[in-house]
Amino acid sequence: MFTLLKDATVYSPEYLGKKDILFCFDRIALIEESINASNFKAVNIVDCRDRIIFPGFIDLHVHIAGGGGEGGYTTRTLSANATDILKSGITTVAGILGADGVTRNIAGLYAQAKQLEGQGLTTYIYTGSYQVPPVTLTGSVQSDMVFIDKVIGVGEICLADSRSFEPAFSEISRLAAQTRNGAMLSGKAGLVHFHMGAADNGLDYLFRLIRETMIPKTHFLPTHVNRTHKLFNQAVEYLKEGGLIDLTAGFIPNEADKDCIASYTAIKQLIDLGIDTGRVTMSSDAYGSVPVFDEKGNVISSDTVSTKILFDEIRAAIKDLGVPIEKAISIITKNPAGVLKLYNRKGSLEAGKDADCVICDKDLNIIKVFAMGKAY
């Protein structure tokens, strides 16, 4: 019934100092300087001396049902594995379809989310895929949000990319309005989650949405914005106008791709520029494909990534670049909880919230993960 984490250094993600944390079933019951275990029956005590505890990580962009297919059937990727995700410190995921909205569908995505939920994760999904009009389960984005418990928005809508369906701005603004209405009726976040490619038009539609419509900026989340320097510079300006952005882990500059920006470098640059990182999230894009195209648009190779890269790159920001722990950890805890409208349950360590946490050693290696009070 009870689990007591003793003598930990706690980041909520704000620094709380040395604390004891008591779980009662799947919720946090108490966080105090000292909690007497003898006051509780059947208590499991976990010695956390020399340990650091963070809230469970939130990955808001995971291809849980697999992805890929841009190079034909052999480039389809496998579906997500709950054990691997949990070992990465991630306790909450938002599942998404990508380029393939034909052989993969929302029913399959929902079923995979339910399977992962049964294996210990908290799961949500986006309706739709790259295409416009989006594929849905009930016939519209609005009704999917109202009637399907796990649907928290639509995406990933593909823009500025050779795989885009080249929607007109009127189609995008109408889709955003439908999502906004679904959000109001359902009490959900109602994100329109955009896949951003490397084309020159970049975030043009996003700037128009926040300047030309009355839809709140909190409904738009462009991802992969560290794909190129030009796109990242646009993202900086978008942040300055009050928008949200999502960085993608795994973009590491190399000989084949010199123009991308590593997520940890992007975080450091934003801080150095004095940008409020409270509206910045980061996701792994895990289990999707990472295709490489030739100059004619043909896929010449395809790979995939693990959710493990999410915390790997946050740790690099902290240990290699000196980003304050509180700021770095917020990007995968508090910030996405706010964006997904889950902060009443997730994103911080507070009494009454879900018992999700990550226990690390002093070198920020993950030792143990608790998801809804269960240890992994």
Image: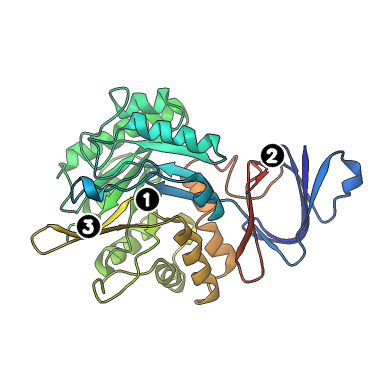
Local packing at callout 2 (Cα closer than 10 Å; few below 14, some 14-19, many 20+) is: many
Quarter holding residue 179: top left
Q: Which of 161 and 5 is in front in this view?
A: 5
Q: Which of 121 and 94 is in front in this view?
A: 121
> Image height check: is 258 above or below 105?
below
Expressed as whole percent of the image width and height from the top left, the position of residue 260 reads 29, 69
- Residue 342 image point, x, y percent: 53, 40
Mark toward the viewer: 1 or 3: 1
* Nearest to N terminus: mark 1 or mark 3: 3
For marks 2 and 1, the one nearer the N-term is: 2
Q: How far apart are marks 1 and 3 (CA)?
A: 25 Å
Q: Tell me how many marks there are.
A: 3
Residue picked out by circle 3: 202
Left-right relation of 129 to 17: left
Q: Which of marks 2 and 1 is in front?
A: 1
Q: In which quarter of the image is the N terminus?
A: top right
Mark pair 2, 1: CA separation: 30 Å
Q: In the rendered structure, are the residues bearing label 3 and label 2 in contact, judged by CB atoms less than 8 Å apart?
A: no
Q: Which mark is residue 27?
A: 2
Q: How far apart are marks 3 and 2 (CA)?
A: 42 Å
Residue at 40 percent across and 48 percent down: it is 61
From the viewer's perspective, tell me whether residue 321 is left or right of residue 161: right
Residue type indicated by callout 2:
Arg
Q: Which mark is residue 287?
A: 1
Task: Pinpoint residue 128: horizontal percent, then vertical percent.
Answer: 29, 36
